[in-house]
Amino acid sequence: MKRRNSIDKKIKRKKIGLIFTLLLLFVTTFLILLTKTSFFNVSEIKIIGNEQLTEDKIIMASGLTIEENIFKIDTEKMEKNLISHPYIKKTKVKRIFPNKLSIYIEERKEIAAISYIGSYIYLDNEGIVLNILSDKKDNLIVVDGLKIKNMSIGKKIMLEDNQDIDKLLNFLKDCKKNDLIKEISRINIDNKFNIKLTMNSGLNVAFGNLYNVKYKVSFLIKILEDLNKKAEKKNIILKDSTLYFTKGDDPIFKPHKNWED
């Protein structure tokens, strides 16, 4: 009886071993088919959120090879590759089986161009250097007078002489929130205690320092609305007129000679 039980146990172990071997063979064959068959090769890439970067540039930055097997793709590596692009702030890559990928992109937006030795340094609202070009793009504020200590694409710009890039960025963000940014063509920071703005209309604004910015920006918007209405009514231009925030508690408007009360 004991001998029979021993034989049964051996047969059972052999059956289990055979089943395990067959299962392992099946899984191995299945995985080989998954990685070798063209059915799982990426044939479509859906890119979401891009406005400035083309799809080709995003795919190139990701390091993805078209028609690569979806199981061989390292999505974390793709995300790291994408984040290294200066215009990409956040990203998420997802597989869509059997043969698609989705790439979500949050881009960094240009907020100003810093004039520097015949070139323009393009910054986003965090002070990250996005690009350095010889030409200025239309409808983008130019900032003069910044003394640059260090800069490299993809990194935050560093300034000399206690110039505070964060105060400038906060000012630009406040202007953007109120759509005032569309009215400004140039900012001069040669004197940090008296920031000078040049509006698209040609009006000069002696803005003073970058303290109490929210109040001064809201005040400036109201004054510009009033001045623009008067200028339109009288069919005159604001060019070469000056608005002072630096002569006392209240702003003072000094018109050009073509202006009459």
Image: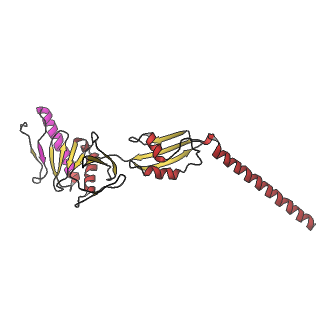
Q: Residue furthest bottom?
A: 2
**Residue 226 appears left or right of 99:** left
Residue 50 in the magenta stretch? The answer is no
Q: Position of residue 35 (x, y in %)?
A: 63, 46
How does the figure colour the protein chain or chains? secondary structure
Residue found 54% across the figure and 41% down from its top: 66
Q: How many marks?
A: 0
Q: Is residue 148 above or below residue 201?
A: below
Q: Quadrant of residue 20?
A: bottom right
Tell which of 254 and 117 is nearer to you: 117
Tell me which secondary structure the magenta stretch mostly adopts. helix
- Quarter of the image with the C terminus in it: top left
Q: Position of residue 122 (x, y in %)?
A: 31, 47
- Quarter of the image with the N terminus in it: bottom right
Span highlighted in magenta in the image: 216-245
**Residue 239 appears left or right of 21:** left
Residue found 54% across the figure and 51% down from its top: 74
Residue 243 in the magenta stretch? The answer is yes
Residue found 51% across the figure and 40% down from its top: 45
Tell which of 135 and 128 is nearer to you: 135
Q: Position of residue 22 (x, y in %)?
A: 77, 52
**Residue 88 appears left or right of 174:** right
